[in-house]
Image (cartoon, grey):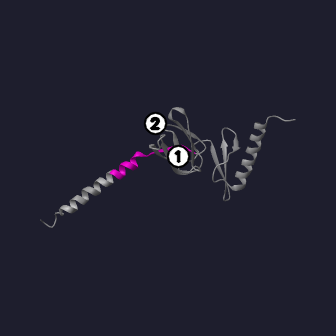
Amino acid sequence: MSCLQKPRNGRRAAVAAGLLSVVLSAGAADADTVRVNIDRSHIMRLPERAATVVIGNPLIADATLQNGGILIVTGKGYGSTNLIALDRAGREVKTDMILVVGPGTGDLVTVFRGVDRETWSCAPKCEPRMTLGDAPAYFAQTLGETTARNGQAGGGATK
């Protein structure tokens, strides 16, 4: 045997390591990445046998399973999380990564007042819009106004 040849055991170890890397990378390739804009919904199709959906971090995304394997995923916060769909026997039928990104609309304007940030939706008139990362005072004021308005709309007109 020359000094350039590997012993037989080394060749077996190399083949085993190569097979292991193929198996591990195949598992990682099974998961697709689904991009969802924050505050937007995305419709996905799951296998019809899907009965349960699990979201790794519900602060990032939410999912609602509908009849016929239709899944509605809503972006709740920036970042990534995983989605696992199970059948009635608890077997995994689908795994995806969910990536929640910025609003993705061209009508947003970001205003900085020193270090404080405000987000406005300008389509065509500029109106305040709450976005994660806005200054706490601006976010709270906009949320308060939105909550009061929605309460009035839900409660009906009063005299």
Q: Which residue is mark 1?
A: 54
Looking at the rendered image, the quarter that the C terminus falls into is: top right
- Which of the marked residues, 2 or 1, is nearer the chain's N terminus? 2
Looking at the rendered image, the quarter that the N terminus falls into is: bottom left
Do callouts 2 and 1 mark residues in contact (Cβ within 8 Å)? no
- Depth check: give the residue in front, 29 or 85: 85
- Depth check: give the residue in front, 27 or 121: 27
- Amino acid carrying label 2: it is Pro
* Residue furthest right as drawn: 159
Percent coordinates x, y for residue 71 in the rendering: 53, 38
* Residue furthest left as drawn: 1
Q: Is residue 20 left or right of residue 9?
A: right
- Which image quadrant is residue 66 in? top right
Give the Cα distance between marks 2 and 1.
Answer: 15 Å
Percent coordinates x, y for residue 131 in the rendering: 64, 49
Examine the rendered structure and indicate whether residue 62 appears above or below residue 47.
Answer: below
- Amino acid carrying label 1: it is Val
Q: Which residue is mark 2?
A: 47
Q: Is residue 109 magenta?
A: no
Q: Is residue 154 left or right of residue 52?
A: right
- Which image quadrant is residue 147 in? top right
